[in-house]
Amino acid sequence: MTRKLSFLLIAAVLLVMQGCTTTLTKGADRRTQGAYIEDGTIADTATTRIKNKYAEKVHINVNSYNRKVLVTGEVPDESAKTDITRIIGGVQNVTAINNELTIGPVSSLSSRSGDALTTSNVNMRLRDSGKDFRAERVEVVTENGIVYLLGLVTRAEAAIATEVTSTSRGVKKIVPLFEYID
């Protein structure tokens, strides 16, 4: 197997696993069971509605954490970006929207694979930080090297997560979207 094919295979597995992290680690998550379930429904509903309207014209990732939505990816123009915000706003139980879509061509598979590797690297480093910190309380989303950090955290936990992320491979910028509980 060539190095490129091996890299793509590993990246594909990481992309699939990326969506599984929250499900596997629910026990340490501070969201209520209701919010946790609603977040899955919000993300699935918004993604379906956007894909039904835009199909292959856009690349979007919808993440919901405690009923607050982060949408990342690429859209062809400002009109699509605005419309996607409207579509998400029409989904039941959404309380806030962070629209981080960029206007431009759809990202390549290699770019998305790199983002998946960055997310995995940050998650592993958070788990191995050796600090009084539960990595499962932070959801990591990477788009074009920009790492978004979501979670219900204390300010001390946010500082640890941001510090560890800032020194992780592949991170161009960090956007903390935490909700603070202290």
Image (spheres, rainbow, N blue to C red):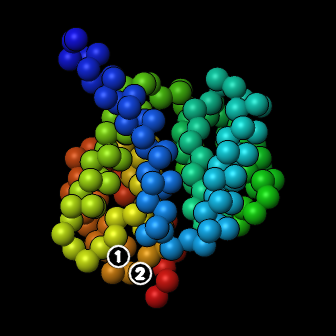
Tell me what residue is drawn at x 26 percent, y 67 percent: 163
Q: Amino acid at mark 2?
A: Thr
Q: Amino acid at mark 1?
A: Glu
Query: What percent of the width, then of the height, locates residue 67?
Result: 65, 64
Q: Using residue 14 as the reference point, say whether residue 68 is left or right of it.
A: right
Q: Quadrant of the N terminus?
A: top left
Give the SS element for disc 1. Answer: helix
Q: Using the image, tell me which numbered label, if any, was put on residue 115.
A: none
The residue nearer to you, when weighing 8 against 29, is 29
Vertical position of residue 123 compared to residue 15: above or below? below
Tell me what residue is drawn at x 59 percent, y 38 percent: 60
Q: Which residue is identified by label 2?
A: 154
Vertical position of residue 118 compared to residue 166: above or below? above
> Would residue 67 be visible to someone looking at this image?
yes
Give the SS element for disc 2. Answer: loop
Tell me what residue is drawn at x 48 percent, y 79 percent: 180
Distance of mark 2 from mark 1, alpha carbons? 5 Å
Residue at the far bottom: name it: 182
Q: Using the image, tell me which numbered label, if any, was put on residue 157.
A: 1
> Would residue 148 be visible to someone looking at this image?
no
Query: What percent of the width, then of the height, locates residue 181?
Result: 49, 83
Tell me what residue is drawn at x 43 percent, y 35 percent: 15
Query: What percent of the width, then of the height, locates residue 174?
Result: 37, 58
**Picture quadrant of residue 112:** top left
Mark 2 near mark 1, Cβ–Cβ under 8 Å? yes
Vertical position of residue 167 compared to residue 146: above or below? below
**Picture quadrant of residue 160:** bottom left
Query: What percent of the width, then of the height, locates residue 132?
Result: 26, 77
The residue nearer to you, when weighing 90 against 35, is 35
- Dot 1: within a 10 Å radius of its alpha carbon, few (fewer than 14), some, or many (20 or more) residues? many
